[in-house]
Structure formats: C-alpha cells, structure tokens
Amino acid sequence: MYVRHRPFLAVVCRLIVTAVVFFAVAEVSPCEAPPPALNGYVTRAGSPSDFDVNGFHVLLTGKTLIELPNSGSAIAADDLKLYVGLPIQVFGKIQDKRHSITATKLTLLQPAQQKIATTGVIDGVPSAPLDASSPGDHLVRADGYLVLISAATATTFNPPLDGTSAFQVNVWVSFQGTRRRDGVIVADRVVFSKNIIGAGEDKLRSKREYDPNAIAPNTKQNALSKTFRGVDPKLIPPYKDPAVQARVDTIGATLVPKYQRDLPDTDETKINFRFQVIDNKKWHDAVALPSGIILVPHQVVERLQNDSQLATVLADNISTVLEKQDLRLQPTAHRMAAESWAGLVVPGFGLASYAEYKDLLRHLEEESGRVSLFLLHDAGYDIYQAPLAWWALGSAKGIGSTPLPRRAEYIYKMLGETWRVN
C-alpha cells in the first residue's frame, strides 16, 4: 500500500512546494507595486507638515509625491488640506522607535457616496434643514446620522403616527438613503413607528435592575454561574469612592438627552439613567443595563485622561440603552445558545449563528459610537477625544504604544464623514 502510493505523494509534495515558491515570488515581484505602509485615517491634523496617520507622525520630504483621490494627479505639500478622519494611504518606511514614517507618497482617498440602511430612535430635530430645497423638507437625527426627508422620499407612518406627529424626538425611524459628502443621509425611504415598551422589554428592564444598597461588599459570582447565566449585575458590589462616584454622576447626567429628561415620570419610555462605579479590572468598558443603570469600573475611569474621554464611555453606554440594544440582541443570542447546545451533539452546529452574533455586536458597537458623538456634542464635550478614549482603553500601554483599535478607527471614520472640519 505505502509503496504503491509513494509516487502519488511525491507528486503532491512537488506541487505544494511549487505553489509555495510561486506565491512567495509573486509577493516580492518587482512588477507589483508595494502596499502602503499605513492605510487608515488622519488622527491629528496640525498642519500640512505636521500630522499623524493611525497615530504615526508623517514626515514629508521634498520628494514626497501627494496624489489626489481617484485622479492620480499630484499637488504640492502646501496645498494639502487635512482634517481628522480623512482616509489616506501612506507609502514609505516606518520608524517604530520614533513612531513615525518618512513618506515617499501620500494617496488621499475620498469617502464614497454610500448607501445607508438602518433603524434608530430620533433623538434630535434640528431647527433648520440643511440645504432644504422646499419648506416640506424635514431633517431628523437618528442612529447617529442626520437624515434629510423630502417630498421625494417614500414615507410610511405606522399608526397612530401621521405626517404631523412623526417628525419629533422619541419616535423610531427606519430609513435608507445615500450619504452625501457633508455626511447628511438623503433618504429614499423612511418608516416611522411609535416608541412603545412591550411586555418583553418591560420584563428585561425589571430582570436587569441594580440596587447598590442591596449588594454586600464581598459578594462574588462564581465561574460556573458566569458560564451558564452570564454576568449577573446583582452580584457586582459597588466601589466605595465618593469622589469618583460624584464625578461619574455629574458627567453622566449632562449626557442624558434633553428629550429624555423632559419626559414625565409617568411616561413608560422614560429611562431612569443611573451610574454606579464598580471594581472590575477585566472590563475595558462600562456596561449598560436596559433599566438605565450603567456600571463603570473605576479602572476605566483611572485610565482615561480627561472628562471628555470619560464622557465618551458614558455617552456610548447611554446610547446602547436609548437604542434598545439588549432587546435587539436577544433573538440572535437565544438562537446561538440553542444551537451551541446542539453543537455538543453535532460538532460545528451553531457556527453560523455565532458569526451572525459577532456581526450584530459589531454593528451595535458602531451604532452606539455614532450616537455618542451627538450626545457628546450636545453636552459640550470635545468629540475629538472620543477615539482617543477607546484607544486608551484598548491597551494597558496607552495611546501611541499600540496599533489603532478597530473601535477607535471607526470613530475616526465617522469624524471624517459626518463631522468633517477643514
């Protein structure tokens, strides 16, 4: 048997070696242009000769070629117009010790006009529509976007809403449209729905409630419980530091949107936002419960550099509650749990739902990041500290000592697309 198959195995081995050599040669082929050393966003825009990309300081020389987007035509360095969030490719050699790159070429990229389809609660109605072409145009703020709704937009009002009552805060809207260069979404289609609290959401709020006075200081959740039940907030004791707690409470209160603060206590859609400092060195974020309580590890507070960065984390978690993310996660989470149990019998079963769950988590993380920028802006915080907050929490070594985390990268992307300043 082995003698008979040895020639076949030898042929297979030769084919594998040939393929490896071919692709290795192809990777270093002099006919192929080298990839950019950095492919990301401007993370600091001091001047045309003083800026960073993905945290690396870019050094220009007299020989640096600067290409305009989609044209290949070159411009002079003095004509370089930069803004935080500008997508850009940098070619050259990185000097890791100096955390810089000497650029041989810059390619400026233009954010493409992209289709957006999403759902969110209206948390703001700007007083004057941007570039409105007719008095019937409406501009609403939802899901971290400015959405322009015109007479050409296919509009549906789910009862009891109508054309008079729909264009206001605390209303849910599903929309699709095209993002303009100024970041505004020009809607092709919108559907308005009343914000209601169903039985499932009411149960979820009650189940995930938190009373710091009812938890003993030495309370702990065992590993088996965490595995099968997840983290139980009722088993997380508060962290006793009045100064830190007061700071978190003060900043958090400024971030709750006005429409929520203005709702009467009898309105079931009003969320009782509360902030509680806890001790948890394993969390690199706060955790929001659908009841409105936000658990903030004191380790997170201590790692952040200023109030705007702390406000970023709080605003992000406020956004997860406003957008009912726990409720929206439940169907996929339940399906994944059921298929995971089935996977004990049928290996590999449930992997599709796990991938779907991860994609949904990423989508919701991006959503809360977008919404948080508006909450930060409304409260007077520096929105350009937002990506730095997630960068600081992404590594114990701090900003500049770790690659740009995905979460911070997305915020830079949104700063360039929706909040462009140049």
Image (tube, grey):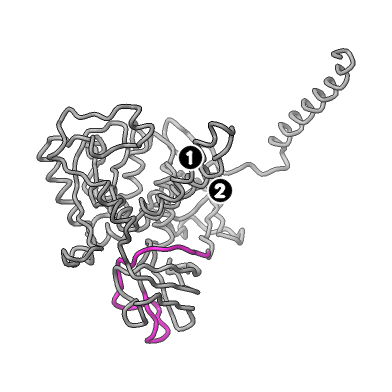
Q: Position of residue 197 (x, y in %)?
A: 30, 62
Q: Position of residue 323 (x, y in %)?
A: 34, 58
Return the residue found at the far top. 3
- Report the front residue among 356 and 125: 356
Q: Which mark is residue 370?
A: none
Q: Which residues are magenta?
A: 115-139
Compared to residue 342, the image places residue 291 above or below, namely below
Write down the residue under mark 1.
101
Secondary structure beneath label 2: strand
Horizontal side of 369 relative to 80 (left or right) equals: left
Q: How many marks?
A: 2
Residue at (45, 55) in percent of width and height: 86
Return the residue found at the far left. 242
Q: What is the crowding at mark 1: few (fewer than 14 residues within 10 Å), some, or many (at least 20)?
A: many
Q: Position of residue 400 (x, y in %)?
A: 37, 37
Compared to residue 274, the image places residue 140 above or below, namely below
- Report the front residue among 326 and 331: 331
Horizontal side of 356 relative to 144 (left or right) equals: right
Instruction: For marks 2 and 1, give the CA distance.
Output: 11 Å
Horizontal side of 256 relative to 194 (left or right) equals: left
Write down the residue under mark 2.
105
Compared to residue 281, the image places residue 330 above or below, namely below
- Look at label 1 and name its amino acid: Ile
Marks 2 & 1, CB-CB < 8 Å contact: no
Residue at (35, 37) in percent of width and height: 230
- Look at label 2 and name its amino acid: Lys
Secondary structure beneath label 1: strand
Residue at (42, 63) in percent of width and height: 119
271 part of magenta stretch: no
